[in-house]
Image: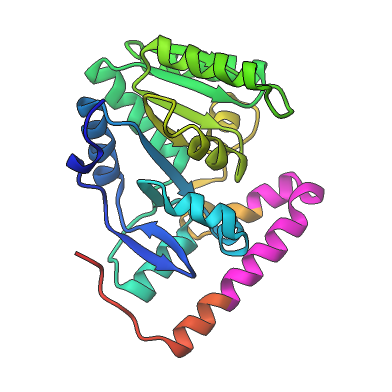
């Protein structure tokens, strides 16, 4: 494996104790491609408001997320906060599902393999077919859905062996937040690939769930689209996370000066 320190990772800024990368699609994609070429395992997360606030409220999870190499601003409100508090100058977020497509396009062009790990067998199977239809030269070297329970030590070791034996350069992890980030962190020294946590991308591109319209995404209303689809499951989540985020952001704007983007 290559030397992790040879990769120039995007700079990070502090958002309420969470280190979020001030990055763009292009920069994040090039950095992952550089890690793939160098044979450097890495961890990539995409945090919307809910993921960010989960890390804020859970010290153990926050420490795991802060150890990731790239923590991309998945949600528009996260990008807005980086711009207001750190003058990051970001013109767009780095949305996990969109990043999947861009990275698969790069993988198809450069010839490196990807592995799909997460969701349910029917979902991950349809996702594989959809990606291969979209990118005919893409090498999906493995796909699987783990059981909805903690893996035994033997099952976990077998899954890691399958990923490493496949030769995958990128493992897309779609287990939902915070499970996917916890999985990637706990396997950082065992999976010899760039692990990219992509949240709902598995559900979207398999056709299992509908993605929010572009106009809602641009206005930071993706949470509302998902809430209307699953009000019982997501109602409390968004009430808590959105309210807490707005309160923390307002307090920081009132009490703290804006800092320049780190160099």
Q: Is residue 83 left or right of residue 226?
A: left
Count of residue discs = 0
**196 and 214: which is toward the camera:** 196
The magenta segment is 225-247
Instruction: Residue 59: give x, y in percent of width and height.
Output: 58, 60
Q: Main secondary structure of the magenta part?
A: helix
Q: Report the residue that reaches farthest toward the bottom.
A: 255
- Residue in view at x 45 percent, y 83 percent: 253
Q: Is residue 219 left or right of residue 40?
A: right
Q: Quadrant of the N terminus?
A: top left
Instruction: Residue 185: give x, y in percent of width and height.
Output: 49, 40
Which image quadrant for residue 31?
top left
Residue 231 is inside the magenta segment: yes
- Residue in view at x 63 percent, y 27 percent: 119
Visible residue check, residue 51: no
- Whether 102 is drawn above or below 96: the answer is above
Q: Report the residue that reaches farthest toward the front.
A: 153
Instruction: Residue 217: give x, y in percent of width and height.
Output: 50, 52
- Residue in view at x 41 percent, y 61 percent: 79
Residue 101 is inside the magenta segment: no
Q: Is residue 134 left or right of residue 77?
A: left
Q: Is residue 237 left or right of residue 90?
A: right
Visible residue check, residue 84: yes
Which image quadrant for residue 203?
top right
- Residue in view at x 27 percent, y 26 percent: 106
């Amino acid at each position: 494996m290559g030397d992790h320190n040879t990769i120039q990772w995007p700079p990070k800024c502090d958002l309420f104790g969470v280190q979020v990368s001030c990055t763009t699609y292009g920069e994040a994609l090039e950095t992952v491609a550089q890690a793939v070429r160098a044979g450097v395992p890495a961890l990539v997360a995409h945090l919307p408001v809910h993921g960010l606030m989960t890390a804020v409220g859970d010290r153990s999870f926050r420490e795991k997320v802060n150890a990731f190499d790239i923590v991309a601003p998945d949600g528009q409100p996260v990008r807005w906060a980086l711009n207001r508090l750190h003058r990051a100058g970001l013109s767009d977020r780095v949305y996990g599902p969109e990043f999947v497509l861009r990275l698969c396009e790069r993988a198809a062009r450069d010839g490196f393999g990807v592995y799909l790990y997460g969701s349910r067998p029917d979902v991950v199977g349809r996702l594989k077919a959809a990606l291969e239809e979209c990118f005919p030269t893409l090498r999906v070297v493995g796909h699987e859905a783990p059981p909805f329970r903690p893996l035994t030590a033997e099952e976990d070791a077998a899954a890691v062996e399958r990923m490493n034996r496949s030769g995958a350069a990128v493992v897309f992890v779609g287990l939902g937040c915070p499970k996917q980030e916890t999985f990637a962190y706990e396997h950082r020294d065992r999976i010899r690939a760039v692990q990219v946590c992509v949240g709902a991308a598995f559900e979207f591109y398999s056709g299992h769930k509908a993605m929010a319209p572009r106009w809602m995404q641009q206005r930071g209303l993706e949470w509302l689209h998902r809430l209307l689809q699953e009000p019982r499951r997501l109602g409390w989540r968004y009430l808590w996370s959105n309210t807490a985020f707005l309160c923390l952001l307002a307090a920081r704007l009132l009490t703290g000066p804006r800092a320049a983007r780190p160099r």
